[in-house]
Image: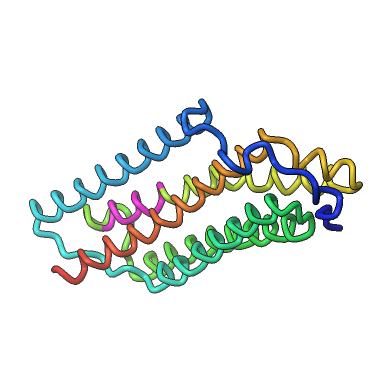
Amino acid sequence: MSSRQASSTRQHPFDHEGPSPFHPLNVIMILTLIGIAVLFLAFSGAFIYSRMQAELPPVDVPWMFGVNSLVLLASSYTIGLATKAFKADDTEKYKKALLYTMGLSALFLVLQIIAWQMLFAENIFPSTDNSAGYLYVLSGLHFAHVIAGLPFIVGFFWVARKRMKEPVSVLVYFSDPEKRLKLKMLTMYWHFMDALWIYLVVFLFINRMMY
């Protein structure tokens, strides 16, 4: 049940200004994302250098990588819907959006395993050559970071389902500035994972075209 009627005269503490960008949690998240970006850029540079030095052919990127791009884009959209529903105090839409995000994230992980199995079927293993090794390392690192973020989405959904049963508890939940901030950071992280995956797919595709 939505609690918009109960909160029609109420505003969130951060509705106008938002949490400070220098909030410790914001700073930690930004530094974390910068660190992840640097890590992937370093591996991308090492991948290019290794290929040029050994004159190795690139590995064909499985078409499942493209399907997974669409899945992640969809999950990025649904977690954005969860944020909007939180701001609108819409209980049902909020829980549904979190549930959809969980489902899409799990689907991404399953499809990624299938993509690796497609490579195995073509006798392309991490030990085949450096090109194959870096493909597995880059996609594996992204896989690990998606797994790392998934428990937080599950946690938000579990707490929402457990506590948001009565108008008062719903009001308390949506009024919590800490939850609002953490949801914002989770959304930021998930959008970053989406952008990072698109970067990887484009990067690998360009490397294939330039060979």
Quadrant for residue 176, please give it: top right
For this rendering, which residue is in front, 20 or 141?
A: 20
**Placement of 27 over or under 58, stated as above or below:** above
Instruction: Indicate whether residue 134 is drawn in magenta.
Output: yes
- Residue appearing at x 30%, y 64% in the figure: 202
Residue 123 pos. (x, y %): 33, 66
- Residue appearing at x 83%, y 53% in the figure: 3
Quadrant, the C terminus: bottom left
Quadrant for residue 171, please give it: top right
Tell me if 176 is positioned left or right of 145 in this view: right
User: What is the total number of numbered labels drawn onto the structure image?
Assistant: 0
Q: Residue furthest front?
A: 9
Quadrant, the N terminus: bottom right
- Residue appearing at x 83%, y 57% in the figure: 2
Tell me if 62 is positioned left or right of 184 in this view: left
Residue 169 pos. (x, y %): 86, 41
Residue 117 pos. (x, y %): 44, 65
Quadrant for residue 152, please give it: top right
- Residue appearing at x 53%, y 30% in the figure: 25
**Placement of 193 over or under 205, stated as above or below:** above
Which residues are drawn in magenta?
132-141
Tell me if 91 is positioned left or right of 154 in this view: right
Instruction: Indicate whether residue 171 is drawn in magenta.
Output: no
**What's the magenta bit mostly, secondary-structure-wise?**
helix
For this rendering, which residue is in front, 141 or 39?
A: 39
- Identify the image's colour scheme: rainbow, by chain, secondary structure or one colour: rainbow
Residue 95 pos. (x, y %): 74, 55
